[in-house]
Structure formats: C-alpha cells, structure tokens
Amino acid sequence: MSLISVHKYYNIAIACASCVSPALFGWDGKVGCPLAYIPAERPVFGREAYKKLLPWQEHCTLMKSVVGTGIPVVTYGIIIGLPDDDHDDLLRLEEAITDLVDELVEINPQLEFQTCCYSIIPLPGTPQAFNLRKEGLLQFEDSCLWGVWTTTSNTHHLTYDQVSDWQIRLSHIRRSPTEFTNYNGEYSGMVSTASSHDSQIVLAKS
C-alpha cells in the first residue's frame, strides 16, 4: 500500500494526463494506492505565485485522470494568504474548486475529497519571511503556533484573521468522514468546529 503525492509526478503527468496509469494510482480495496495528495492550482487570479504548477485546464484534466483510476481518497492542498489575495480572489478559487469537485464526483460517485487549506507559513530566515516583514504583512513571528496551523500574516487586502476564516471555509469543501487515516491528521479533526477566534486565543496566550 502506498500514498502518492501527485506533485512529485508532474513531469510525467504533463506528458500523459489523459492516460494516468492504474498501476500507479489504482486501488482494488486491498492492493494499490488508497489516497493521493494533490496540490491545488490557482485558476486565473493569483496564479503569479503558482507559476511552477500546471495551467488550470490541464490541472483539471490531470485530476480527472487520477480520479478515473478509482482511487478512493483525494486530499487537495491549497495555499492561501499570498500577499495579493483578497476576498474576490478567494471566492473565485472556492467556486472553481467546487465546480471541479462536482465533475470529479460525477466520474467516481464514491470519491472522498478532502480539502487541506494552508495559510502562508513564513519560516524565519527564508526570503518569504524577509519579504513579508519588509512589506509590513508579518503579524506574528512564531510560525509554529497551534501546530503551524495559525495564520501569522496579513495580505495587502485581508487581515490575518480574515485569512484564517478563509482557511477554515475552504477546508469545508466536500468534507466527509473517511475510513482511511486522514492525511491531514489532527488538523482535520479541529477544522470542523474551528474559527478565527480560536487563533486569537492561542496568540493571546503565546
């Protein structure tokens, strides 16, 4: 049994997104790959920070190819809190992902789709942390608050608690219980009842 992170196979997937091998992704209930972790693409808006990823339509084709193999669980990793993120960008992202998931469920009605939404985590000493601090967006220095799930930065248009609310909101897209160990671990258990107020409590105690 193996868990596949699809981003490791993008060079392969770009060349043959329409013929993803069942030998790599297939699952018959006993043997194969029960879960794939796939990083999200940003559709049109906010794409500048995702240049290394596939264009949106090619990304959707790859997703459909993977789901078509019968893999039962897909965990979808989203990163928000980019410096230029605003409500409109995130609304469009939510709409695009929801539409994509609807298409994936048509391919496999039994598909369990888990959304894992991360906010920017500016690790000390990295260029990202330097740039966020330089632009005055870094709200909190400690990136390990609440197990690295607490939003620590503002954007040019959103406060850190608004980013946190979006993180929670996007994590609820097609959320459902699973027979498999959840890829996101403790975070997935917390997110169903979480709010940005929880982050404020943690930060107040830090």
Image: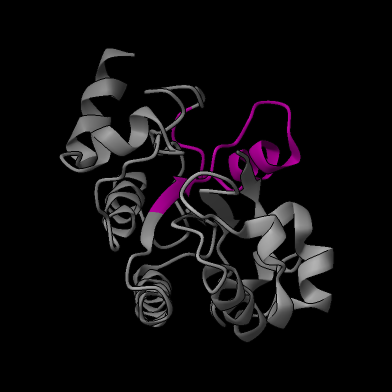
Figure check: 182 above or below 19: above
Please, which residue is most extreme toward the bottom here?
A: 57
Q: Is residue 167 left or right of residue 144?
A: left
Is residue 46 something one can see in this rendering?
A: no
Please, which residue is most extreme toward the top here?
A: 205
Q: Is residue 172 left or right of residue 137?
A: left
> In the image, is residue 169 part of the stretch drawn in magenta?
no
Give the residue drawn at x 30%, y 62%. 173
Quarter of the image with the N terminus in it: top right
Which percent across, then down, holds residue 68?
54, 74
Is residue 162 something one can see in this rendering?
A: yes
| Quarter assignment of residue 47 | bottom right
Give the residue drawn at x 43%, y 80%. 107
Task: Give the camera-side residue of 81 and 28.
Answer: 28
Figure check: 17 above or below 167: below
Figure check: 80 above or below 152: below
Quarter of the image with the C terminus in it: top left
Give the residue drawn at x 64%, y 43%. 134
Task: Give the camera-side residue of 17 and 23.
Answer: 23
Q: Is residue 170 left or right of residue 143?
A: left
Give the residue drawn at x 79%, y 77%. 16
Q: Please, which colouring scheme is shown?
A: one colour
Which percent across, then down, holds residue 203?
31, 23
Which percent across, then down, holds residue 151?
40, 39
Task: Give the camera-side residue of 68 and 152.
Answer: 68
Which percent across, then down, holds residue 116?
42, 49
| Quarter assignment of residue 44 | bottom right
> How many numbered marks, from 0 up?
0
**Over which residues does the magenta segment extend?**
115-140
